[in-house]
Image (cartoon, helix red, strand yellow):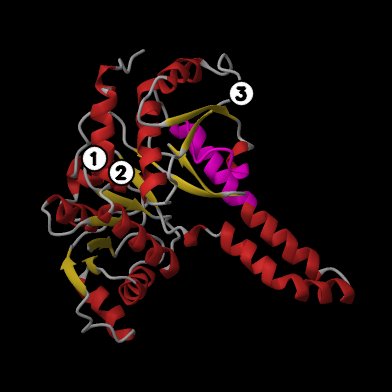
Amino acid sequence: MKIAVDAMGGDYAPEEVVLGAIEAVKSYSLDVVLVGDTNKIEEVLNRYGAKDNSHLSIVHASQVIDMGEHPAQAIRKKKDASIVVATQLVKDGACDAVVAPGSTGAAVTAALLGLGRIKGIERPCIATPIPSKKGITVLLDSGANANSKPKHLVEGAIMGSHYAKYILGVDKPAVGLLNIGEEASKGNELAQATYPLLEKMKTISFYGNVEGRDIPKGTVDVVVCDGFVGNVILKFGEGMAMFIIRLVKDTIKSSGFIAKLGALAVYPALRTLKKRLDFTEYGGAPLLGVDGSFIICHGSSKAKAIKNAIRVAGELAQQDVVGHIRKSIEEEEVEQYDSEN
């Protein structure tokens, strides 16, 4: 596999992005194409003794899209931006997947304009893996579409189910519709209109309605909702995880000698807990529904997150998740659903 990486995207580019790529080619059987300012990328490669690594190459891009820029305007204005060039490499068949740290808006726009949508998909969505009691729960949409319609949630259910099956290894993923209660009659107009559509689908295993607390419990493998609600849940979860870790550390520091001694005994368990809650372990979130393998990374991603994002990008392409989604969309005849109703 050959993965195109936007080396200029994110808060710590290009240093951490390039370092993550170096670590990725050491650990996985794939090649990485670093897209961005050649001089800056080579400087980092030289610093880490990786300039002559045959699994790393550079494609120059003279422009960068900053976090504060309007995504659509920037994409159209900056034709040689690193994210645009990286996406074009996949479009042209030179690479198998894209890893995009930095502006989520710019990444989504570049993917939509550069790769297009899978036929039958009206709204691609971001699928985010969230640690749960039973392993991982996939939440989607987690931010691509603030205003969704029933058809879009149906599309999300199909895409999330295939991601859980082929990337997370769940044989028959259970799909839940996020709601304020378990009864089919519960919820707003969107939830009530979506429920019967999911219920009659052939290519997914629909569990029914689930509530917010079911996400960390792992009640289902995939949870679908609109992007506004999904993003709020995601950001709240990230903040709560960081708060819990900080609270435990501060409590131990302010406690007496006996408590600190006890903390040493449970330190391995605390380290395991931190690892499970650490978003860098999961690398990035796939943008599902575009006609190509595309991974979006957190803006603050460092080398570890980039490394894991490259791994997931390779798996996404290798497992042909896009092809499986396309097949299910055709089988379910999703295009028959009127997105206005």
Q: Residues within 10 Å of mark 3 (few under 14, many from 20)?
A: some
Circle 3 is placed at which residue position?
182
The verdict on residue 229 being magenta is: yes
Contact, mark 1 vs mark 2 (Cβ under 8 Å): yes
Residue 209: image location, x then y, percent: 55, 26
Q: Looking at the image, is mark 2 or mark 3 nearer the viewer?
A: 3
Circle 2 is placed at which residue position?
108
Position of 242 with respect to 172 (left or right) is: right
User: Residue at position x 57%, y 50% from top?
Assistant: 238
For the magenta stretch, what is the residue range?
A: 216-240
Q: CA distance from mark 2 to mark 3?
A: 33 Å
Disc 2, SS = helix
Residue type at mark 1?
Leu
- Give above or below for 315 relative to 320: below
> Mark 2 vs mark 3: which is more N-terminal?
2
Position of 325 with respect to 131 (left or right) is: left
User: Residue at position x 18%, y 46% from top?
Assistant: 77
Circle 1 is placed at which residue position?
112
Residue 187 in which image quadrant: top right
Q: Residue at the left extreme?
A: 92
Residue 330: image location, x then y, percent: 23, 28
Residue type at mark 2?
Val
Q: Quadrant of the C terminus?
A: top left
Disc 3, SS = loop
User: Residue at position x 24%, y 78% from top?
Assistant: 42
Q: Residues within 10 Å of mark 2 (few under 14, many from 20)?
A: many
Q: Looking at this view, is 227 or 173 the one in front? A: 173
